[in-house]
Amino acid sequence: MTVTKGNEPGTELADQNLVTLTVDDVEVSVPEGTLVIRAAELIGVEIPRFCDHPLLAPVGACRQCLVDVPDAGNGRGFPKPQASCTLPVSPGMVVKTQVTSPVADKAQHGIMEFLLVNHPLDCPMCDKGGECPLQNQAMSHGQGETRFTEKKRTYPKPLAISSQILLDRERCILCARCTRFSEQIAGDPFIAMAERGALQQVAIYENEPFSSYFSGNTIQICPVGALTSSSYRFRSRPFDLVSTPAVAEHDACGAAIRVDHRRGKVVRRLSGDDPEVNEEWISDKDRFAFTYARQADRLTRPLVRDPETGALEPASWPAAFLAAARGLAAAAATSGVGVVTGGRLTTEDAYAYAKLARTVLGTNDIDFRARPQSAEEAEFLAHAVAGSGLGVTYRDLEEATKVVLVGLEPEDEAATIFLRLRKAWRTNGTQVVAVASHATRALEKVGGQLVRTIPGDEAKALGEAGLAPGTIVLLGERLARVEGAFTTALAAASRSGARLAWVPRRAGDRGAVEAGCLPNLLPGGRPVADAEARADLAAAWGVASLPGEPGRSTDDILAAALAGEIGALLVAGVEVDDLADPQAALDAVDAAGFVVSLEVRASAVTERADVVLPVAAVAEKAGSFVNWEGRRRPFEAVIPVPHALPDTRVLAGIAEAAGHDLGFRTPEAAAAELAEVGVWDGARAPKPEVVPGRAPRTDPSEVVLDTWRRLIDDGRGQDGDRHYQATARPSVALLSSATARAFGVREGEEIVLRTDRGAVAVPAGIADIADGVVWTPANSNGLSLLGILGAAYGAVVTVERSVPADEADALSGPPHPHVPTEEDEQ
Amino acid sequence: MSAAPLTPVLSRGWDHERSWTLDAYGDYAALRSALRQDPDEVIATVKDSGLRGRGGAGFPTGMKWGFIPQDPTQPGGDKPHYLVVNADESEPGTCKDIPLMMANPHVLVEGVAITCHAIRAKKAFIYVRGEVLHVIRRLQAAVEEAYAAGFLGADVFGSGIDVDVVVHAGAGAYICGEETALLDSLEGRRGQPRLRPPFPAVAGLYAAPTVINNVESIASVPCIVERGADWFASMGTEKSKGMTIYSLSGHVKQPGQYEAPLGITLRELLDMSGGMRDGSELKFWTPGGSSTPLLTAEHLDVPLDYEGVAGAGSMLGTKALQLFDQTTSVVRCVLRWTEFYKHESCGKCTPCREGTWWLVQTLERLEAGKGQEGDIELLLDQCDNILGRAFCALGDGATSPITSAIEHFRDEFEAGMHTPAWDLFPYEGSTAWAKPATDAAKGATA
């Protein structure tokens, strides 16, 4: 990205203080403060550079971008060539680049020759070869023959600075982009320059790996092949790759990515370049977690349960469509069908489910929230989120005076937001406040302050966050577990003039809201309860009427299935361990008379389903996500896989087999129809009115559970890359020193968290956390708190100090850490 | 100018019994009188005296002090001010600050206190080269004595002015003599030069306005305050006022520190130091350490002030006069210096880091008599690609000995194409224990 400050869209150039200078005899006007290297870009002159990066502070270290400045704007020139990456423009300045100045050209050639002195000529085997700024610029601004014939500096190679990031010190040209990125952008200064002279090198602290959720960005901005990833090293040549722009599917940030594939297989992912969203950075999860779709449990053929053997047998698509259609139609005609879609769908696929539910299955029993949920949340989404378009944006965050985080840990749950908050704090002095039980490292890295609270008391604590006009409040998914939180936030925002934004955790969440995958919402933000809205949509869909009775939420659908009140379930990508009560969910799936599961990989649901329909993974289909801002993020299919059908196509097949026409068969057509159906311009659904609750009371043996999913954890979307998984942070159960004392627990000692469902053993960590609270990750190191304890955010768990010997074996403990071996590479 | 006598001011009491103690030094009378003056008056006095930085660059000291923002509305004006004394003397051949701090630490401490008053700083740091532990200890003892006597600390001499002095030991990196690298090092970071602007006068130590001065500059302040700007300006030349310490080393009979008015010539200094060692004649010399282009016997009468040496194509630098006689191989000498720069390059910028790495290997070839055709042009081109392209002055300094040596002694580099330097100039001939030069050795210079 080469956006100069002041080049923001919508900002008229004339509004800014422009400075006029001459670059290579061409007069150009640029905003005050622009660096010469960027001013030259505006007239089409690319000055070679290495250390310069538009998103990092200027450093002037590599000296590659030297230009001649015969007049600094004051009538006097610089006697020496100047680094154009550190030199701001001034009025009347005259700059001569390599294009018009032999001095600048010679200086650049000289630097290039020096850079190659200690750079190995291993381009033919280097991962960067073919896309290497050093290689490219040595061709364009270097000499063909070297005059250096002596000894180069050599090192053992490569050096693992984390399980994922490998450092080849011989290739490093010491531009310090990686170390500056880690310090400035990520706030994880765990790599730094050490030694001096030509022996200067990027280093980690002894035995302390480069532990950053954003470490992969250093590979991408490395202008040589000094940093490579364990997962991509020696896998491909850039010119053998097919690159496709795409959107990251692991969170609701909508980060632009580039997916590179070779011979039908994704081999790596890079950050895209979108100044409005993720700039040029992505998290390691967005970068490395892409092998999940090619695991051994990938579903490749439709399966239909044989009524005689009771086993799932492969079937043809038409047969599977027919079987699904019959079962669903039969249930729809009698007791009804429940649709549970999960948060991983594209907007188009979500729309297909929403339409199928209303027009074919005749029900509003549809909910995307495959996680703990509340009616208040659904009302909040209908009132404040659905159909509201682009609301609070990343740029708004950057320019806000204050950002309040409630029920949201940005680094773990919305990494792009975290980076933008850090930028906002560093460049704009934005004050970040977290309403939480403890200050996380992420909060420290955004210079934030804590309003301490116990899970459940957020509504009360919000009053202490000091909302005012110019404040933005970000509400996380966990607030569905906090009674009255949404009600209070809405009231506080309208009182104070602060703006609200809902930041869900999954890529498909916001799109599902827009598409109408909620029991109280139809597509385009139309409230189910609003007869006009229903009539409007019915007319658009060409149907006589739509079911007017509000549907059931996910929990209620499952409860109804368990009670026999719902005859069939249509389940999209849902992991039962994500649900509020996994065991009850499994029982419900077992109890339901007929279950259709659309899945990418085998799961507990597909095992129990009557019809299993394999669907395309994100990289195999076109579609779009709507990110938390409300920004539509469309993408094309990366790899066309003929047998992998998008959910939309499968649902159209079911509808047709049931004698209905869904109106579309492809995501493109679904998107067109959704756009045509449009956004509801009538009255919005009423806002929720829920009396704020309180944190649960606890016995002396109990604590309140604070938990969320870490960025890198056991989520199935992250399966398959052991180098990546090895960078996950170790599990810990954080307690305050007072709480730890009360339980007689010492730092590092294993404690047992128990509910009536089960128990987990986690090493205790003493932290500055609210008394009477334990924080531990929701799904890390083999411990799924929902799966094992049935405990979500704000639940009450008992704490025990040590593991009774007779029970030790029965406890679910962390598995042995995996040590990568050569075999893993294959 | 008449034959310049020595003018011992800073070095006046060096031969006194326990010269480094407060008893031998005095009672900080200059500080006492400075504290009675307005800070701006002190700055004006130093400006009027014409004192220029003694660390090498020769920037007017009083002007530097005047850059410190005193108006709280100016950038940096609302922050505390700091004085940092650059005592990281590491330039090859330079040996003036270390003996000064060893023999007369109190003149520096008193200068620090006066300067703090002038620039309105409450805290000063003396950044001493890490290897010279004996000097650090002596300086620490002097600071302790000054505190005990009430010359430092809170409310000095009842003036209501507080001055705190910290003696900080560096870790032995040449680059930390570069003022912004010194600041980074003092702040606890790796010593690497900073991007300017902002300049230290606005955002220096801890991003606060900072004056960084050489030891000798600050040590010259008490005598200016005590004896007046006119007295100081009466010494030296038109644009280079006052006295300074010249350090002579190498093939000279009496090496050491000679304090004399600026503008004295090497011929005069050689007269005072007993001339070159027996049987030897001056071949080449550096006027101010190895970073200044070397000069030859034809420059014996160049006035050793800022303008005079610049006029001869070199720089006054640190006034480290290294003298080499006819037994010395220029190629070998230049290689040793270049090895130093390679070792001390901080690694931040490409030309210095990679250029010195390459220069050493090219020079090694020439020293061994294995030079190739075009090597001299290569050396000159490498230097051309470093000079003025590096991040700080260290890169420029690394090229000076090479380009000037080739200018004056090109034939010796050409000899490197076929004959090892040790054959032309047997290395034992230039040692301190070598017998007076033989005719054979003399003849070899041809």
Image: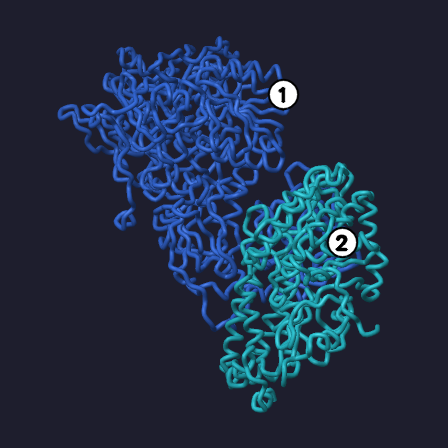
Chain colours: A blue, B cyan
Residue lying at 52% horizontally and 81% vertically, measured from the top left: B428
**Same chain for the residues under marks 1 and 2 in the image:** no
Q: Secondary structure at mark 1?
A: loop
The reply to whether residue B231 is in sight is yes
- Label 1 belongs to which residue? A468
Whether the residues at callouts 1 and 2 have beta carbons within 8 Å, the answer is no
Name which residue type carries label 2.
Val
Q: Is residue B292 above or below residue A469?
A: below
Residue A303 against residue B180 in the figure, above or below: above
Task: Assess disc 2: are there few (<14), some (14-19) or many (≥20) residues with their C-alpha within 10 Å of its C-alpha.
Answer: many
Drawn side of residue B24 relative to residue A630, left or right: right
Q: Nearer the viewer, mark 1 or mark 2?
A: 2
Which of the chains bears the disc numbered 2? Answer: B
B372 to B287, vertically: above or below: below
What's the residue type where badge 1 is placed?
Ala
B230 relative to B415 in the view: left or right = right
Q: Quarter-wise, where is residue B337 in the image?
A: bottom right
Marked residue chain, label 1: A
Residue A399 drawn at (x, y percent): 62, 32
Q: Where residue B242 sits: x, y (%)?
A: 79, 62
Residue receiving disc 2: B221
- The answer to whether residue A389 shows anywhere in this view is no
Q: Nearer the viewer, residue B66 or B345?
A: B66
For the point 45% across and 18% down, the residue is A454
Total tally of numbered discs in the picture: 2
* A481 over B36 or under it: above or below: above
The one of B342 and A383 positioned closer to us in this rendering: B342
x, y percentage for residue A815? 26, 34
Q: Residue at x 50, y 40 (%)?
A: A186
Estimate the x, y position of residue B228 in percent, counting from the top left: 84, 55
Circle number at residue B397? none
Q: Nearer the viewer, residue A31 or B244?
A: B244
